[in-house]
Image: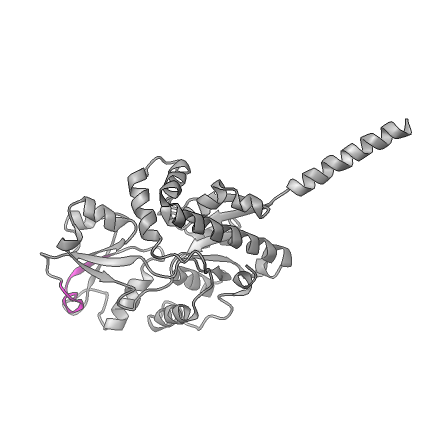
Amino acid sequence: MHKLIGGLLAGVMSLAAVGMAQAADPVTLQLKWVTQAQFAGYYVAKDKGFYSDEGIDITIKPGGPDIAPEQVIAGGGADVIVDWMGGALAAREKGVPLVNIAQPYKRSGLLMICPKDGPIKTEADFKGHTLGVWFFGNEYPFYAWMNKLGIPTDGGPDGVNVLKQSFDVQPLIQKQADCISVMTYNELGQAIDAGFTQDKLVIFNYTDLGNDLLEDGLYAMGDKLADPAFDDKMVRFVRASQKGWQYAIEHPEEAAQIVIDNDDSGAQTLAHQEYMMKEVAKLVDPHDFKLDMAAYDRTEKALLDQKIIANKPQGAYTTAITDKL
């Protein structure tokens, strides 16, 4: 009898131990935009089991035009977000204690494109014309650029008219703007498909002009990072994410298919995701997620100069997570 009870107890304890070993820490990631290869590394890390290997039970929430990642995390709807630094620092100054914990994207994919047969050939031609700009935190690089050029953004013959651009290339097709904003990995491809091939465009590259601000960093809340258990969870999350980006860039076609498999909207096409994946690979360093301080300083200065933020941020980033990878 004692042996039977002992055996039963041992079995129960063994099952409990297995259950504890299999328990994973939940992490919710809020993306800045819809499901697409811009975020391929995270979907690949989930699909290939890299998060599970690190004891992370991941939930990836797509974004959209009416979703602000800063508001989602402030409301407790995410543990970590993908965000542009301009939006993150602006939100931080408004009381959302966002902290950059890793920076996969090293280069900006932002461009301003204009038809070659249009009125704009150089930056000096901007005055008096209409430029399409995305908002919801995406406008900060543009305003910093215009501030650097000394061009007012409130219209008039010596300024530019700012069109609140839709997240597509329709303003260019419909001639609502003389130039529009595009990303190298997304809308530039749409423009090319619409007949605006690169030989027919004047292209202003934010990175080449020294106007790039950091994009698609990973941000968590500072108060949560003070908890050693949460800090450890973020280390494991970032490590798995880095593995996901490494795999995605080494296997772009498979990564594109994984993105398609995770697109519940059904709006994406495999061909466009393959194009996007190849372009994204030029911007991400999958072997180094550390924040580049020169890029941070440039971003901070541009935001201060444009008065997008009024005060020099304190504690807006940490290297503690990437130092532990």
Residue 223 appears in the rendering: yes
Q: Is residue 19 left or right of residue 186?
A: right
Q: Which residues are magenta?
A: 121-132
Q: Residue furthest left?
A: 117
Outermost residue toward the right in this view: 2
The reply to whether residue 170 is visible in this rendering is no
Q: Which sits in the foreground, 49 or 115?
A: 49
- Name, please, the residue furthest toward the front: 250
On screen, 296 above or below 110?
below
Q: Is residue 188 magenta?
A: no
Residue 53: where, in percent of width, then height?
A: 57, 45
Q: Residue at x 39, y 58 (%)?
A: 105
Q: From the image, which quarter does the C terminus lie in? A: bottom right
Q: Is residue 51 left or right of residue 297?
A: right
Q: Which quadrant does the N terminus fall into?
A: top right
Q: Residue at x 33, y 70 (%)?
A: 306
Which of the two residues, 249 or 189, is positioned nearer the viewer here?
Answer: 249
Picture coordinates of residue 253, whole percent (x, y): 35, 42
**Percent from the top left, x then y, of residue 94?**
45, 63
Q: In the picture, residue 103 is in which quadrant?
A: bottom left
Say whether residue 219 is left or right of residue 148: right
Q: Is residue 310 rendered to the left or right of residue 207?
A: right
Residue closer to the observer: 179 or 176: 179
Q: Residue at x 37, y 49 (%)?
A: 38
